[in-house]
Image: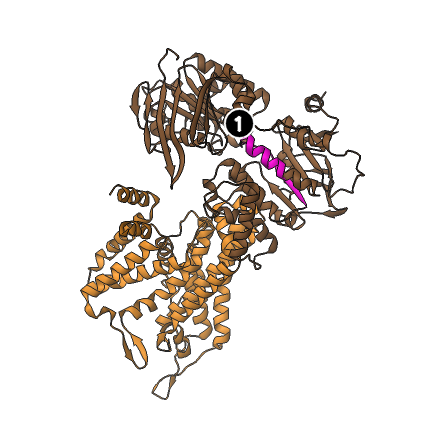
Amino acid sequence: MAAAYLRRLTTRDGFWPIAVLVLLLGYNLIADPGFFAISVKDGHLYGSLIDILNRASPLMIIAMGLTLVIATRGIDISVGAVVAISGAVAAAMIGGELVLSGGTGMADVTRYPLVIVLPCALGVATLCGMWNGALVSWFGLQPIVATLILLGTGRGVAQLITSGQIVTIYYSPYYVIGNGFLLGVPFSLFIAAAVAAVLALLTRRTALGLFIQAIGINPVASRLAGIRARGITFAVYAVCGLCAGIAGLIVSSNVKSADGNNAGLLFELDAILAVVLGGTSLAGGRFSLIGSILGALIIQTLTTTIYAVGVAPEVTLVVKGLVVFVVSILQSERIKALIGAAKRSV
Amino acid sequence: MPSSPAVLEMRGITKQFQGVRALAGVDFRLLPGEVHALMGQNGAGKSTLVKVLTGVHRADAGRLLLDGQDIAPQSPLDAQRLGIRTVYQEVNLCTNLSVAENIFLGSAGTSNFAIRWRDMRRKAAALLAELNVHIDVGAPLSRYPLAVQQMVAIARALTAQHERTGRAGTRLLILDEPTSSLTEDEVEMLFSVMRRLKAQGIAILFITHFLDQAFAISDRFTVLRNGALVGEYPVAQLSTMELIVKMVGKEIAAAGPGRAARAAASEPAAPPFLEARGLSKRGSVTGIDLAVQPGKAVAIAGLLGSGRTETVRLLFGIDHADRGSLMIEGKPVRFGSPLEAIRRGLGFCPEDRKAEGILGELSLRENIIIALQCRRGIFHSLSRARQDEIARSYIELLGIKAHDADVPIATLSGGNQQKALLARWLATDPRMLILDEPTRGIDVGAKVEIMAQVMGLCDNGMAVVYSSSEMTEVLDYADRVVVMRDRAKVGELDAAGADEQQVFQLIAGG
């Protein structure tokens, strides 16, 4: 009974990502009994868990957008560059001037109001996604090549926007995005939740999810069945760009500056990892938004754990790699089959 | 019985997939130098038996003996090393590589360290010449028609025979539906090759849905039904009818007279639903005139490569004509994409089911509702309950055999996949259905069922255009026959008055 239940459980999608996450958290609890403690300071929630959620939110948002792209059998390796571009646009429009106000501190100065800044930054990010989408769907470039172009030039564009400077933002309303709290919870979590809700609605309440899977499984057959494969592929890249743009706002708000060179550096790798850890295959087809969120949480928990445990910085990447290795292996068809066979014989 | 020891013996082979029994204690023997046909309907277990033999699946129980020695092939490569060579139904080659590369892929080296390209090409050409195929082996495989690709696949299977690299030569050649895409000449060519191999003592396991071919080339039959062995028979002992009865397990009615002969031929001609005038596409077909009335069926006949597929692709908006016009109910239309054709009430079952039809990892249910969903548009999504209802009703109507509607469609047999594709279009309530080789690679029973369904709808006012290379299929179901040769229309016949001879004459250009 119990064995059969366990077998069904372990072969279910999403089991291993959750199990690894629980393991990681459990380890932290043993290493630091106060790990789960959440306290309230100034009406805000504080604690390691809150910190992990907060820090993981840009990655969650990017991973969700990327999930849709990967489900169409594509890839977008330019998301890190788009993060930089979006932050750069926002910072440039706010302006990097420090105006001291009467010796008590800085004054909130912006060249344009946020209602203009934010749509512009997100619009530029969406345009980046549309550029990728056009290259893939209309010009038929291979996704990795098409998005490699923006990966390479994107950071240059970001630096052009900020005139090669690291622009510091002196405008506190902007800080809310990445540092603020709403109802005691980090504001960025609300953003991530909103993105998750919108994408879940789009893919489950409309036929978009089905069409995306169909395209990923067999683009030719999808077209013959009546799916507008080009249009949908284009849209999916645009959405991915938008998600990266949102993440860019959070990141730049969090560090109160825009650094064209380093903002979102190597995010594309973490995002791809998050998607894969969540159980979405790079071969396209079936996808899981929840899985990608879990994947992002695993990566962030891992990073936090490594720092908390005090692993030497030199071996950080090795430890990270090991965990990723284990989760990926556990999800491979081969190991699933082996585990199934082993249990049957027991 | 026979005195010579068997090359291969399979004893009591049993195999289950997720609780569903695919094979139940099947015995099978193959003697040296014989052609042995494995017969059975779709889902009888032929493919599973072959896959156990070739190491794709491992049997749950039973023994495999090659030359009296127990073997347990763990992978297709393993089976190949043992001298078991297979040519699959759907040609599994790399069409972007050259013909020569395809033949020697995997067994590449003519030397241990590097590929000797010139050597390889020479050997490839020699191999193909033996099969009576004379082509440029340096050209990419995609340049050649399916039939030639099939020959290349056979040549590839035979390379072990020619290499003498210390590995076992081919003892046993499995041909899984090798003739489903070949013309009669090519089939004859293949048969002569088979006879030559037979004379060399190679045992050939032959799987086909063409009964006449099975009788023409085989020495013995083994018949499977529902995963169980029915029996093993020398060919001379069975008549065609007896064989069919053993395969389906019941008497089936002999095919009645053709549809055209039955239908009242004197009905007043309705205005056509779809009409093509002088449809042409550069590098493809030229001058296609074709008209289909509601409730009528038009067959497009012609040999492989005559332009049948190209023609139906133009009708459905997959490819775009650069000359000529297309009209629906008298009004000119230009389909920019299949979706536009679907919105005008067309449906299309492609010839290559695996590559262009099914969405393998999606469920049967999703495969059935997808065209209807596309027609409704992305924001008018069908509720899950409605999807289940649609899927259930078509699974029942067409007798699709599946565990439930949520199994991936790739796990179904070819005939059931084809029925699911038909269900996909029926769900859109089409005004016209286009079928490109609707019965390719599926068994007799499913063939009849599918065509009966389509024709039933046709009688109720749906227009049908289908292409076929089987003359009986053309004449049995069509009202009119459009004959093609060399990518152009060469004639049109009234099916009621036509016989095979007339159609062949048009095809032959007489």
Q: Residue extending furthest bottom?
A: A102
Point out residue B53 in the picture as x, y percentages from the top left corner.
37, 28
Tell me the residue that label 1 is attached to. B209
Query: Which residue is found at the position 36% from the left and 21% from the top?
Result: B9
Residue A185 is one of the magenta-drawn residues: no
Q: Residue B327's image quarter? A: top right
**Left or right, residue B385 beside residue A96:** right
Question: The chain coloured orange carries which letter?
Answer: A
The colour scheme is: by chain
Point out residue B208 in the picture as x, y percentages from the top left corner.
51, 26
Point out residue B266 in the picture as x, y percentages from the top left corner.
80, 34
Quadrant location of the C terminus of chain B? top right
Question: The chain coloured brown carries which letter?
Answer: B
Q: Residue B481's image quarter? A: top right
Region in magenta: B431-453
Q: Residue B324's image quarter? A: top right
Callout 1: chain: B
Above or below, comparing residue B36 to residue B227 in the picture: above
Residue B443 is one of the magenta-drawn residues: yes
Above or below, comparing residue B427 to residue B216 in the picture: below
Above or below, comparing residue A10 to residue B213 in the picture: below
Which secondary structure, mark 1?
Answer: loop
Q: Residue extending furthest top?
A: B3
Q: Is residue A150 visible to the viewer in this orientation of the structure?
A: no
Callout 1 amino acid: His
Point out residue A126 in the picture as x, y percentages from the top left corner.
50, 62
Quadrant location of the N terminus of chain B? top left
